[in-house]
Image (tube, rainbow, N blue to C red):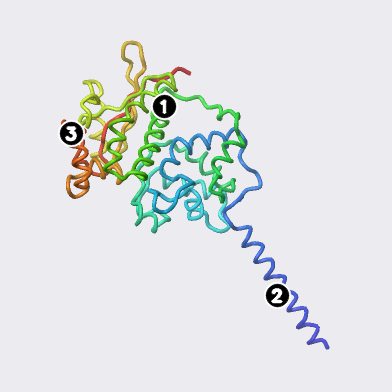
């Protein structure tokens, strides 16, 4: 009798242990991983940063054929490990995006399919804001970002005092995000060759629209322009030479601000990545013949070919807005 009772108790104990293990495993899923979510203002700021820097490549919508980078949910799932603390998740995510390398990537499949992501030039505090919000929020649904932004609609961004360089950078990155989103849409819908027409017809218009929207002049220039109208002037060429020298040394070129005629003008580097090679890489080997033909017909004075990855393609020039 004693042995029978002991066996029953043992079975009950094992069933309870198994149930607890299932519950713990469920709690270890990387959705809603915090009981203390970020404050609404921080969440609003994270949403703005994701829209500015991330969604043009890591859009929550789309399918595997359209993508040029993995969605944010896949990134969260790979960088979250069972039982991981918020602090460790933020540290792991931030360290990689600050300095992406093949050795530190946790997504070998994405690395093989999409290549290594470029350096974005983001600040550590910005990445920590994004990572913290990703850890705290459920992003399982494809519409998570829309719901996220709607949920914090009207919330102010976190109150931080921005330097001149940072204020100009926000303008440059917002403009880059709009151009990137539209360019990727054109490539997805019409292919690389036909997307050249988008650059020819829409890029300057969109840049001018962003200048008007943000109430500050902003432009892209280069020492090797595709469009002669984007040729850098003498002061801009000085910064381009500096940025190229830093990249050649394996360093990240810092943005700079010059005071010109009483106006603060910021210079921000534009560095090539793998996707750029479709239109700016080596003719015949990286730029397909159809794309080359379209470039030559639309830009007979083109100088913007022959680049490699992680080289200076040009710079953003922004008149710094006031406080």
Expressed as whole percent of the image width and height from the top left, the position of residue 271 reads 30, 37
Q: Which mark is residue 171?
A: 1
Instruction: Name the front one of labels 2 and 1.
Output: 1
Tell me the quarter of the picture where residue 39 sits. top right
Q: Is tag 1's residue or tag 3's residue first in the polypeptide sequence?
A: 1
Secondary element under disc 1, as helix, strand or loop, is helix
In this rendering, the label closer to the viewer, 1 or 3:
3
Residue visible at 22% across and 21% down in the picture: 233
Alpha-carbon neighbours of circle 3 within 10 Å: few (<14), some, or many (≥20)?
some
Taking 29 as reference, is 270 above or below it? above
Q: What residue sits right under mark 2 in the picture?
A: 14
Locate residue 273, reporting x and y percent: 30, 43
Q: Give left or right: position of 249 versus 14.
A: left
| Alpha carbon separation for disc pair 2 and 1 | 60 Å
Q: Quick one: SS at disc 3? A: loop
Query: Which one is in front, 98 or 270?
Result: 270
Near-viewer residue (282 or 267): 282
């Amino acid at each position: 009798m004693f042995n029978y009772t002991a066996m029953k108790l043992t079975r009950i104990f094992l069933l309870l242990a198994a149930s607890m293990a299932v519950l713990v495993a469920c709690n270890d899923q990387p959705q809603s991983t915090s009981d203390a979510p970020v404050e609404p203002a921080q969440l609003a700021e994270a949403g703005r940063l994701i829209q500015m820097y991330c969604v043009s490549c890591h859009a929550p919508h789309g399918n595997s054929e359209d993508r040029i980078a993995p969605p944010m949910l896949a990134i969260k799932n790979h960088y979250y490990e069972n039982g991981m603390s918020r602090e460790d998740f933020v540290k792991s995510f931030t360290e990689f995006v600050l300095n992406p390398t093949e050795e530190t990537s946790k997504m070998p499949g994405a690395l093989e399919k999409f290549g290594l992501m470029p350096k974005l030039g983001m600040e550590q505090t910005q990445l920590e804001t994004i990572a913290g919000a990703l850890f705290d929020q459920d992003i399982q649904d494809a519409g998570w970002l829309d719901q996220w932004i709607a949920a914090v609609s009207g919330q102010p961004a976190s109150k931080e005092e921005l330097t001149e360089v940072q204020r100009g950078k926000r303008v440059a990155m917002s403009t880059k995000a709009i151009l990137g989103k539209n360019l990727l849409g054109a490539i997805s819908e019409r292919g690389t060759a036909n997307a050249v027409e988008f650059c020819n017809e829409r890029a300057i218009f969109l840049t001018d629209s962003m200048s008007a929207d943000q109430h500050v002049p902003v432009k892209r220039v280069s020492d090797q322009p595709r469009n002669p109208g984007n040729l850098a002037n003498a002061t801009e060429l000085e910064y381009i030479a500096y940025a190229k020298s830093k990249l050649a040394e394996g360093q990240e070129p810092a943005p700079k601000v010059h005071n010109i005629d009483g106006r603060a003008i910021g210079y921000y580097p534009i560095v090539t990545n793998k996707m750029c090679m479709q239109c700016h890489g080596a003719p015949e080997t990286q730029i397909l013949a159809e794309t080359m033909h379209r470039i030559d017909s639309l830009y007979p004075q083109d100088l913007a070919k022959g680049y490699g990855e992680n080289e200076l393609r040009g710079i953003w020039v922004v008149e710094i807005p006031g406080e």
